[in-house]
Amino acid sequence: MSGFLDRLLGRAKTAAPAASSPGFPYELAVRPGGPVPVERLPRVSIVILNLNGKHHLKGCFDSLSALDYPREKLEVVLVDNGSSDGSVEEMRARHGWVRLFVNERNVGFAAGCNQGAREAREPQVLVFLNNDMRVAVDWLRELVAPIVRGECSATTSKMYSWDGKVLNSAGGAMNFHGLGIQVGIDELPSAHFDIPRKTLFPCGGAMAMDARVYFEVGGFDDEFFAYYEDVDLGWRLWVEGHECHYVPSSQCWHHHSATSRRLPLEMVRLIQVRNPLLACFKNYDEDNLRRVLAPMLALAVRRTWMMMGVHEDKSFRIEHAEDPARGGVLKLLEKARQAAFEEKIEVRRVGMADLLAINDLLGNWPHWSARRSTVQARRRRPDAEIFALFLKPHWCIEGEKGYMELQQGLSGLYGLEQLFGADRLPEANKP
């Protein structure tokens, strides 16, 4: 591995593009140390969440039972979030070696992971793994090795699709308003995805963290419930002076459980819109939050308008109002006022979800300001040292013309190109 890595990094030194042009971020590459002897391997607790994922359990736990990790240094904890598909019975009947905790209801990914971490028996390293994964025999050894060597506090695996044909994740990235990106998703495997490097956040589907650091930084944010809790945690790690590394030698395969698809779309939409806003509000320093907050909210409002599905707005426009009949002005105005408060129009539920998401921040300003203060009080690293990890800060999530023009205009008005620099991810190498 080391010789191959040296060749890759050596080539990167001579062929890496200029910092101002898009290309693979070779400057984030790291040189890992050698193998960790068995006697130095830490006590590990692997925490897995499950919600009606019975069909995934055999593949996941069969692969975990085949790990080459010392059994006396390993425990596996499963937190079941109120399954109704026989998952609990399946675990008790076929995987009794796993410590099982059963919740009466779905408490969410973030709180469930924190619960599993609290129940773990004196781990030195905490590992979080999705239930729809299978792992390589040496997956765990490789994942914890950089933490043991003191190279970083958290790591994340290389994740493939279940059939191994494309990647699912090769580290994390983000745009400036908090939308997380799984590097390499759906791309063909290639050499630059084999380079260990610093990454903004560890994918919650397959990650490890020094247990002491996990509890010091507060673990996952329970209030996120699900989605972007790993982005927030990774970003917080960097803010508080820690590092996270992508470890391509730690390999696993992802089946896509699609738990969220069984929930109403508007419920998933709400947290997917809200949580990036909360992560940004918590983790940017004060100067940069002042610079990013207005563009972030403006783009969120534009997406809300897009989702609302309101295509006819003439009844709201004064230029389309009918001239009142002579002598009937007061009567017409009173009728208009009554209509404005009592008449209703149809909007899409996903659009209302966007509006509720924005209000979860704006309508709870004192609460999130206090949460933000807690993070900022622990700051040990300036934003300027973190921005290179975003990789794609100017990624435009919507293809709608007005949205793209708005993002471009806001970027110019607030100097976001100068603040974050150019996007650094290479062109996608997709099948």
Image (cartoon, rainbow, N blue to C red):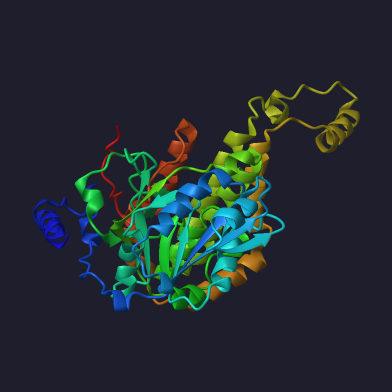
Q: Quadrant of residue 248?
A: bottom left
Task: Identify which residue is drawn at 58% across, 46% down.
Answer: 54
Height in image: 376 above or below 346?
below
Height in image: 285 above or below 275?
below
Of 354 and 95, the residue lying toward us: 95
Task: Identify which residue is drawn at 17% across, 52% down.
Answer: 18
Q: Quadrant of the N terminus?
A: bottom left
Q: Look at the image and tell me whether residue 137 can be seen.
A: yes
Of 249 and 305, the residue lying toward us: 249
The x, y position of residue 6, in whole percent, is 12, 60
Q: Quadrant of residue 112?
A: bottom right
Height in image: 305 above or below 327?
below
The x, y position of residue 397, in whole percent, is 45, 40
Q: Look at the image and tell me whether residue 177 can be seen.
A: no
Of 188 and 93, the residue lying toward us: 93
Side of 298 relative to 63 (left or right): right
The x, y position of residue 3, in whole percent, is 11, 60
Task: Identify which residue is drawn at 55% across, 69% down.
Answer: 372
The x, y position of residue 42, in whole percent, is 38, 75
Q: Quadrant of the C terminus?
A: top left
Of 112 and 136, the residue lying toward us: 136
Side of 100 relative to 208 (left or right): right
Say how many tags the image has: 0
User: Which residue, as the protein is rendered here, is positioned at the far front?
Assistant: 93
Side of 341 relative to 216 (left or right): right
